[in-house]
């Protein structure tokens, strides 16, 4: 699904990622943990296509295509979904309009027929109910005036509607109380399946109690310094990054 | 003497040559009005950038063009080049009320005014001046004078000197037009550079109500100097919804001066969509003369290439307890230039006035320019007034967010612009007219499609 080889990247000329190798297969959930400044955000932005991040060496293959050559909308079309750390508020654009545009843009990219209004609403209602999302969300403008938890739930709703093959969750737990965190984790877990891979990027172990990964990687100074099973997350929580990184 | 940019001479010569033949020439009050106006125009000259209110809107592009009077050419103009013969703007649930002017001349053959309720009169100005000019004496030029013509509007004066046709709408007490009146102003259709000075007079007596949908457009690439004036008097508790679409061709210089007077508890709810012409200036002056009067001047400008569009407004709170609200937003692309000048004036006695004004511009190109000047002049101490202006680019974070969800960049951009402008359309209280405006905005953005987002939203 995702194959990262010897990835080097710079931001404003400074090298942040210094040779990352990571392979994620369909059906797997990986977590990348690391202290502030380790390069977690850079990795996530680079994969999602945000401007200002440059790969200087290596390759990132997504389903066999060079991911970083694609525009952000092409990445979405190919099946990449980034759940934002800070979902953007877009006043004036109704959430339903946005979701319908997104779903149909992605369908169009994939050569599928666009959903008509009826079919779209049917699917939207089903997913909204499934995720326990307040239907009032749909009438409001995208994320405008949403609480932190509501924004993250909205991300989960988008993810469910777009049916991506690779979900990238960037610090999805930041700023969430425990109830919101559980709700988000439930949304993510419901999406797990043999055809879908996930990459969870997080500073804290807390989220991984609810979304249990198959593999955990520790990122430090732009490199993956340790990899292991879910127990590694627990170790990091107990011993802290410094000790775990030094142990590597 | 300061050097003039545009010479008044050809216009004054035209006035002297034509005045004996202008409609209503036999009426001394009208002849006097025209003579005074011509003299004022001569004294003031064409506006230059030295005039404070014209600082941002130069007329130099009109220099050297000799505009022939449209006269009655619109009466006989061939409509061959008009593709869809004046399709009604609103879906026809009932036979529309329509008045059409071509090249400034009223065209009965393109108008449909049957079925007006008793007490409602909609007539060609030229014909009315020939038939029964007396009924206009207390209105023509008087509304503008009362509405704040401080002798500083040369284009208004020029129109008064030269107007030869237009439309007069008069509604008697409590007369209600139950369907919108579509007023189509089709430009001159000839190949010659043309000037026209149409005049519109709207008088709503106490309790009368109407909706006017005014649409300016045209065909061809001959230069046009359009200098329109509208005078609107709203009696006590009268209500006028006034939507104006300025969609003139790219060779047009479009000037419109509107004066409104409002008596107590009257409502003027207006929306202007300014997206046509090479150069346009829409100047509106409203005087709130009766307590409880309520005025909404909302609008949007959509300009690209090298278009220049100026929206200038002045709202005068003369008495206590009146409200005014103005939300004007625009999107400027390429090298387009927008101008917004808004003034709220509150007279010393006009306590409890509530006046709010907001101008926002989205700059879609780094070569586009907006000059915005919101002003408050408040002489009363117990009022609520506010103004604000912003200009900026499309939010890049939002753009990235939309794209990361699969929306192509062009669509993400147009969705953002549409969202930005929708907020101002929603200020128009006549909800039934909003889709028409949104459709125009989508047309401009090139994203019009039958399955509108609005429908999906309703279905949910």
Image (cartoon, coloured by chain):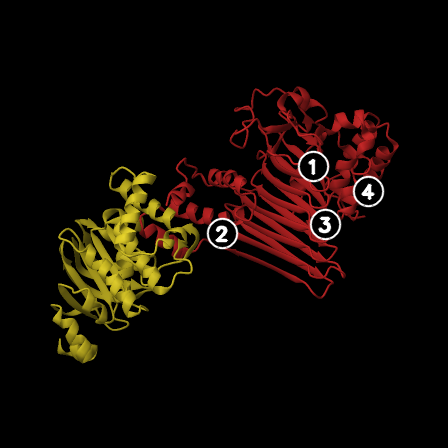
Chain colours: A yellow, B red
Disc 4: which residue: B40
Which is closer to the viewer, label 4 or label 2?
4
The answer to which of B83 and B225 lies nearer the viewer is B83
**Pointer 2 residue:** B366
- Judged from the image, the secondary structure of the residue bearing numbered disc 2 is loop
Pointer 2 with pointer 3, Cβ within 8 A: no
Please state if B132 lies on the left or on the right of B216 as rendered. right
Q: Residue at x 23, y 47 (%)?
A: A78
The mark found on residue B264 in the picture is: 3
Examine the image and state in which quarter residue B275 appears: top right
Query: Which residue is pictured at 26% across the width and 62% down the height?
Result: A183
Q: Chain of mark 4?
A: B
Q: Looking at the image, is B223 positioned above or below residue B272?
A: above
Q: Which mark is residue B227?
A: 1
Q: Circle 3 sits in a helix, a strand or a loop, which is it?
A: loop
Q: CA distance from mark 4 to mark 3?
A: 32 Å
Say yes or no: labels 1 and 3 on the same chain: yes
Nearer the observer: mark 1 or 3; the answer is 3
Sequence-wise first label, 4 or 3: 4
Horizontal side of residue B234 vs A149, given as left or right: right
Are the residues under badges 4 and 1 in a single subunit?
A: yes
The residue drawn where x is 29% and y is 57% is A132
Give B10 or A207, whichever is nearer the viewer: A207
- The answer to whether residue A173 of the structure is visible from this angle is no
Asked if badge 4 and badge 2 are on a common chain, one would say yes
Residue B341: x and y, percent?
Answer: 64, 52
């Amino acid at each position: 699904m995702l194959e990262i080889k010897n990835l080097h990247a710079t931001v404003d000329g400074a090298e942040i990622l210094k040779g990352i190798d990571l392979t994620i297969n369909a059906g797997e959930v990986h977590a990348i943990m690391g202290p502030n400044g380790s390069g977690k955000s850079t990795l996530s932005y680079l994969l999602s296509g945000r401007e200002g991040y440059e790969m200087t060496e290596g390759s990132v293959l997504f389903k066999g295509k060079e991911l970083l050559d694609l525009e952000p909308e092409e990445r979405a079309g190919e099946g990449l979904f980034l759940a934002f750390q800070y979902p953007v508020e877009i006043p004036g654009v109704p959430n339903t309009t946005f979701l319908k545009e997104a779903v149909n843009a992605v369908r169009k990219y994939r050569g599928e027929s666009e959903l008509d209004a009826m079919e779209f609403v049917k699917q939207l209602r089903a997913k909204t109910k499934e995720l326990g999302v307040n239907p009032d969300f749909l009438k409001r403008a995208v994320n405008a005036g949403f609480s932190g938890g509501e924004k993250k739930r909205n991300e989960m709703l988008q993810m469910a509607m777009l049916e991506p093959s690779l979900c990238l969750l960037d610090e999805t737990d930041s700023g969430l109380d425990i109830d919101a965190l559980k709700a988000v984790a439930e949304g993510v877990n419901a999406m797990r399946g043999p055809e879908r891979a996930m990459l969870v990027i997080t500073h804290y172990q807390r989220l991984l109690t609810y979304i249990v990964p198959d593999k955990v990687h520790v990122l430090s100074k732009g490199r993956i310094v340790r990899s292991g099973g879910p127990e590694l997350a627990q170790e990091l929580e107990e011993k802290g990054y410094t000790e775990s990184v030094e142990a590597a | 003497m300061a050097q003039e940019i545009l010479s008044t001479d050809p216009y004054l010569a035209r006035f002297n040559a034509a005045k004996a033949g202008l409609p209503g020439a036999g009426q001394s009050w009208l002849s006097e009005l025209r003579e005074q106006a011509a003299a004022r125009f001569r004294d003031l000259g064409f506006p230059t950038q030295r005039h404070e209110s014209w600082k941002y809107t130069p007329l130099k592009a009109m220099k050297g063009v000799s505009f022939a009077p449209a006269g009655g050419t619109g009466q006989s103009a061939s409509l061959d080049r008009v593709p869809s013969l004046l399709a009604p703007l609103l879906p026809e649930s009932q036979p529309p009320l329509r008045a059409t002017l071509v090249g400034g001349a009223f065209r009965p053959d393109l108008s449909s005014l049957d079925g007006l309720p008793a007490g409602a009169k909609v007539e060609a100005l030229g014909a009315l001046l020939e038939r029964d000019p007396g009924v206009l004496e207390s209105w023509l030029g008087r509304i503008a004078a009362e509405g704040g013509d401080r002798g500083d509007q040369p284009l208004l004066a020029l129109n008064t000197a030269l107007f030869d046709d237009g439309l007069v709408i008069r509604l008697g007490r409590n007369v209600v037009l139950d369907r919108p009146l579509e007023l189509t102003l089709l430009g001159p259709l000839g190949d010659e550079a043309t000037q026209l000075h149409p005049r519109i007079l709207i008088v709503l007596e106490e309790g009368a109500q109407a909706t006017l949908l005014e649409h300016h457009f045209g065909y061809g690439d001959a230069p046009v100097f359009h200098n329109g004036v509208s005078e609107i008097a709203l009696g006590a508790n009268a209500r006028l919804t006034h939507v104006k679409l300025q969609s003139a061709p790219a060779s047009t210089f479009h000037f419109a001066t509107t004066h409104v007077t409002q008596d107590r508890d009257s409502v003027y709810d207006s929306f202007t969509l300014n997206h046509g012409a090479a150069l346009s200036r829409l100047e509106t002056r409203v005087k709130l003369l009766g307590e409880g009067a309520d005025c909404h001047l909302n609008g949007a400008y959509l300009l690209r290439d090298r278009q220049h569009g100026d929206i200038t407004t002045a709202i005068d709170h003369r008495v206590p307890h009146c409200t005014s609200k103005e939300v004007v937003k625009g999107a400027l692309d390429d090298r387009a230039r927008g101008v917004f000048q808004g003034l709220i004036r509150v007279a010393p006695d006009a306590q409890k006035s509530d006046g709010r004004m907001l101008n926002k511009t989205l700059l879609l190109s780094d070569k586009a320019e907006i000059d915005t000047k919101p002003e408050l002049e408040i002489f009363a101490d117990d009022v609520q007034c506010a103004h604000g202006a912003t200009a900026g680019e499309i939010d890049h974070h939002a753009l990235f967010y939309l794209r990361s969800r699969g929306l192509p960049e062009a669509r993400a951009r147009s969705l953002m612009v549409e969202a930005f402008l929708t907020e101002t359309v929603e200020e128009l209280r006549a909800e039934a007219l909003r889709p028409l405006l949104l459709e125009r905005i989508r047309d401009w953005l090139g994203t019009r499609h039958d399955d509108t987002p609005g429908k999906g939203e309703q279905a949910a």
